[in-house]
Amino acid sequence: MSTPTRITHLINGAAWEGTAERTSPVYNPATGAQTGVLDLASTDLVDEIVRGAKAAWENEWQNASLTKRTQVLFTFRELLNAKKEEIGAIITSEHGKVLSDAVGEVTRGLEVAEFACGIPQLLKGGFSENVSTRVDVYSIRQSLGVVAVISPFNFPAMVPLWFVPIAIACGNAVVIKPSEKDPSAVNAVAALWKEAGLPDGVLNVVHGDKEAVDALLTHPDVKAVSFVGSTPIAKYVYETGTAHGKRVQALGGAKNHMLVLPDADLDLAADAAVNAGFGSAGERCMAISALLAVEPIADDLISKITDRMGKLVTGDGTRGSDMGPLVTREHADKVTSYLDKGVDAGATLVVDGREGDVDADGEGFFLKPTLFDNVTPGMPVYDDEIFGPVLSVVRVQSYDEGLKLINDNPYGNGTAIFTNDGGAARRFQNEVEVGMVGINVPIPVPMAYFSFGGWKNSLFGDTHAHGMEGVHFFTRGKVVTSRWLDPSHGGLNLGFPQNT
């Protein structure tokens, strides 16, 4: 067995050379083998990193021209595109998602980098001439300073890329704390920023647990925090960060519903339910976990879904499997416990993900795709964000009943409706109380030039990720009112003679 690799912080353009008082193991979820030892930062180290980032912002980046920033961004985009397969392989080795999905996540992150390349246009202000006699008013947007990004395990490359390119393009310095479960992808991406010409200290990677998070949330030189994770932690990040005077966008959990009307194309709906329910082993904040089937289609739809589930191969993400393992043994055990909870609550276990073989070596953290029928509100499999490959079918009698279930849910991240009725779809998009809506699209993640974020307990703070909301989050507005005296008021005037 090979010796686990040391994974450490990237500070001021170089790997940290200190000795960590605390470390954390990193595993390959497909085999169960420990592959890394992660250094965990102390409060003092976080303070050192933030102070270095502030110096880099003050001395190198806040006044860097838009031309310089875009040159770095374009170069970074090209480097990331060239290395996306390598970074995808890193993600698969630590997260477990299949390789095609891992490369796909990097590609979606690339879209935000491409959006940020247009920062000169995005930062243009407004100008009003002669609002009063010889008085002009104009607006500008300026960087904040040091901003922190705290990212989750489920998208170790894409979620940081939602924030970092825009924050850097807007002139900020960034300290990012990735998940301790799969930290290496962020290190690899950070190395590309350095290669692209970003000055040392403008982007730093600090690894850690709650101690590092609290140090960032309370540090006086951190001006803004971007977070993605579970709702309880998102609420904690928001409350702690704002109590310490910071701007915070904290994206939380989800319980995403897919409403299927009787007129829908059931083959399309079954494909979508399987893809959205079991992709990335269900470890997506946009995964569909509750399928609302408007009767009388439930039996037919469940039959089609079950047939498709039987064709899926679960196993090591490097072997061409359809679905990989869960991220840790503890998380796999937690998700698996919901199968017995569902049965005990009265749901029908149609497909048991504990049964059957997986294509992997060792003792990986696997649960195969699982399907419940006859699920109702109040059952743990319906109420909780399971964050695993567990799809629950809820039988409803009408559009109105299905809509009420969605709107009554405490989460409001994503939702979808499947129908061939344009009127029903238009009504749904207006009436549903959810931040991102799909019409015959099961995972409605918007393009980078729109903004990502939910409603209710899925978002704490007013600002969504990327798009123009992201640009506004990472800048602050300033309005200037100016008056300049006319040259005719006296003094020398070497202007061109005027025949007036």
Image: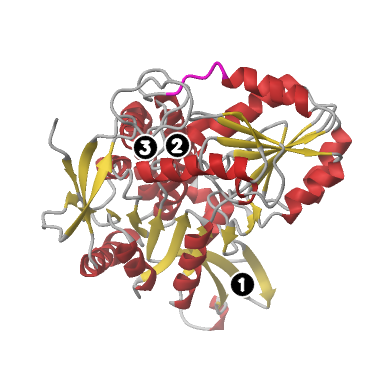
Tag 2 or tag 1, which sits nearer the N-term? 2
Residue to which mark 2 is pinned: 110
Q: Quadrant of the N terminus?
A: top left
Q: Position of residue 198 (x, y in %)?
A: 29, 48
Identify the secondary structure beneath mark 3.
loop
Residue to which mark 3 is pinned: 95
Tell me if residue 97 comes above or below residue 451 in the rendering. Answer: above
Q: Which mark lies nearer to you, 1 or 3?
A: 3
**Contact (CB < 8 A) between labels 1 and 2?**
no
The amino acid at mark 3 is His
Q: Residue at x 86, y 38 (%)?
A: 424
Q: Quadrant of the C terminus?
A: bottom right
Tag 3 or tag 1, which sits nearer the N-term? 3
- Per the picture, the main secondary structure of the magenta-coloured stretch is loop
Q: Position of residue 433 (x, y in %)?
A: 74, 53
The amino acid at mark 2 is Leu
